[in-house]
């Protein structure tokens, strides 16, 4: 422990903010009438993510999760098509890809519901760059 830690006691609120700096308050409403965490969760259902992307123009949290879910779904779709051209390995890998993709979407739904901006390694950076554009 250094001297700085000894001087100021840490409260529960401070430690929660340090652990989840991007967490959103649950009560904030969006222009579509949902709270941010519920809207972010629903974005990972593919069609709803597309709808929210076109309807929601103001809320960055929902637009981030909508774009990330769409880019992830497109990437999984393309990988599945490419694997279909590989005779034996492709069929086995394609069978494994579907439950893994489902588990990933459930995990991302959980992260969005918690109010986190959880970025996937390559796709999250791509989404961030798209949101920065005017």
Image (tube, helix red, strand yellow):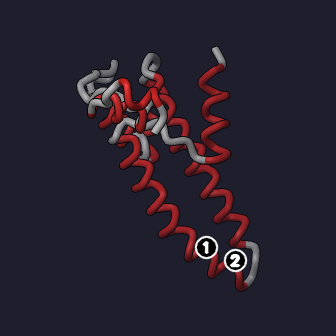
129 to 48, vertically: above or below: above
Task: Name the disc covering residue 133, or none.
Answer: none
Query: Residue 26: percent from the left, percent from the top?
Result: 26, 30
Quarter of the rendering occupied by the C terminus: top right
**Is residue 62 something one can see in this rendering?**
no
Residue at x-position 45% and y-position 27%? 4
Can you say which quadrant of the picture contains the N terminus?
top left
Residue at the left extreme of this rendering: 27
**Which of 58 and 61 lies nearest the eye of the viewer?**
61
Residue 66, relative to residue 76: is it above or below?
A: above
Residue 23 in the figure: left or right of residue 86: left
Residue 80 coordinates in the image, percent (x, y): 64, 65
| Residue 30 placement (x, y as % from top left) | 33, 21
Q: Residue at x 27, y 34 (%)?
A: 12
Residue marked by disc 1: 94
Instruction: Check disc 2 and report the residue beneath it.
Output: 90
Q: Residue furthest top?
A: 134
Q: Is residue 47 left or right of residue 130?
A: left
Q: In this orientation, which residue lies closer to the viewer: 106 or 10?
A: 10
The part of the image, by quadrant, that contains residue 93 is: bottom right
Q: Are marks 2 and 1 in contact (CB under 8 Å)?
A: yes
Q: CA distance from mark 2 to mark 1?
A: 6 Å
- Crowding around mark 2 (Cα neighbors within 10 Å: few <14, some 14 to 19, many 20+) is some
Please tell me whether mark 1 sits on a helix, a strand or a loop. Answer: helix
Give the tally of numbered discs: 2
At 40% across and 56% down in the image, what residue appears? 106
- For numbered disc 2, what is the local secondary structure? helix
């Amino acid at each position: 422990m250094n001297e700085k830690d000894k001087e100021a006691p840490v409260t529960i609120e401070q430690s929660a903010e340090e652990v989840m700096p991007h967490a959103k308050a649950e009560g904030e409403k969006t222009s579509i009438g949902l709270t941010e965490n519920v809207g972010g969760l629903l974005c990972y259902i593919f069609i709803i993510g597309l709808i929210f992307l076109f309807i929601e123009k103001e809320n960055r949290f929902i637009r981030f999760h909508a774009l990330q879910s769409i880019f992830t779904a497109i990437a999984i779709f393309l990988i599945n098509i490419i694997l279909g051209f590989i005779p034996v390995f492709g069929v086995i890998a394609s069978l494994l890809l579907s439950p893994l993709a489902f588990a990933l979407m459930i995990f991302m739904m959980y992260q969005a519901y918690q109010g986190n901006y959880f970025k996937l390694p390559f796709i999250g950076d791509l989404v961030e760059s798209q949101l920065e554009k005017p």
